[in-house]
Image: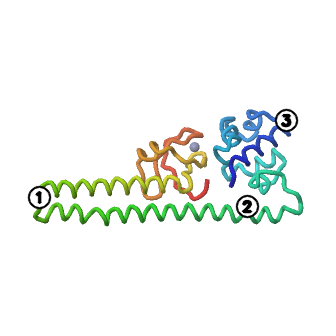
Amino acid sequence: MDQIKIGKFIAQERKRKNLTQKQLAEQLGISDKTISKWERGNGFPEVSLLLPLCEKLDISVNELLTGKRVSEEEYRVKAEENMVNLIKEAQESKKKIILSAAVAGLTIIAAVPLFVISGTVEMENWLRVLLVAIGIVVVTGGIIIACILDREAGAFECPECGERFVPDMKAYVMGPHTITKRKLVCPKCGAYKYCKHVLTK
Ligand SMILES: [Zn+2]
């Protein structure tokens, strides 16, 4: 999905309808900041807004996803391309989540023996310190990689307003979490809630 192209298309169709960002936002019951975000290619309308948005702009969802007007002849081809792309994005997110869990698992498998050996086997002190240090570096590196992969996979969904967003690294790391949810501040409604990790933006 080319968000920049889609954003430009939304802006173009909005202007064709002689609407300001504020007017369109009011009609959709959202903030004009959200519209401006979409138009800059910095976010994509959540599923529940797709149909109302397309209706206001007199375009089809297929055209929105394509980022341009689609002729009758092209329509089917574009619809199928869009469908395949959406499935592909969801699958790639899933892969990243699995990869992230694998990295976390491998890290533990790699580091635990280092700690065990350094704690039990007879050796010089400097060697013991070195083994522990290597263990700490491996664990830290593994956790960072696992976090990067997990954060980039898909998005988080606000339980209050349904907004889907990718948190910045700091908010992600600091947020208390379970395996599938993480406590984050919603950029749209400001709620600080446990947001579900979802596979598509
Ligand atoms: Zn929200």
Q: Quadrant of residue 104?
A: bottom left
Task: Tell me: residue 15, above or below residue 63.
Answer: above
Marks 1 and 3 close (CB-CB < 8 Å):
no
> Does the numbered disc 2 mark a residue whose Cβ is under 8 Å from ligand 1?
no
What SS does tag 2 mark?
helix
Task: Identify which residue is drawn at 69% across, 46% down.
Answer: 4
Q: Quadrant of residue 85?
A: bottom right
What SS does tag 3 mark?
loop
Disc 1 residue type (three-letter): Glu
Residue identified by numbered label 2: 82
The answer to which of marks 1 and 3 sits earlier in the sequence is: 3
Crowding at mark 1 (Cα within 10 Å: few <14, some 14-19, many 20+): few
Crowding at mark 3 (Cα within 10 Å: few <14, some 14-19, many 20+): few
In the image, 101 versus 110, the foreground residue is 110
The answer to which of marks 3 and 2 sits earlier in the sequence is: 3
Q: CA distance from mark 1 to mark 3?
A: 77 Å
Disc 2 residue type (three-letter): Asn
Q: From the viewer's perspective, is 135 left or right of 200? A: left
Marks 3 and 2 close (CB-CB < 8 Å):
no
Task: Identify which residue is drawn at 18% across, 65% down.
Answer: 117
Image quadrant, ligand 1? top right
Residue identified by numbered label 3: 18
Crowding at mark 2 (Cα within 10 Å: few <14, some 14-19, many 20+): some
Q: Can you tell which of label 1 and label 3 is closer to the viewer?
A: 1
Disc 3 residue type (three-letter): Asn
Q: Position of residue 124 (x, y in %)?
A: 11, 58
> Does the numbered disc 1 mark a residue whose Cβ is under 8 Å from ligand 1?
no
Q: Position of residue 8 (x, y in %)?
A: 75, 43
Residue identified by numbered label 1: 124
Q: Can you tell which of label 1 and label 2 is closer to the viewer?
A: 1
Task: Tell me: residue 124, above or below residue 54.
Answer: below
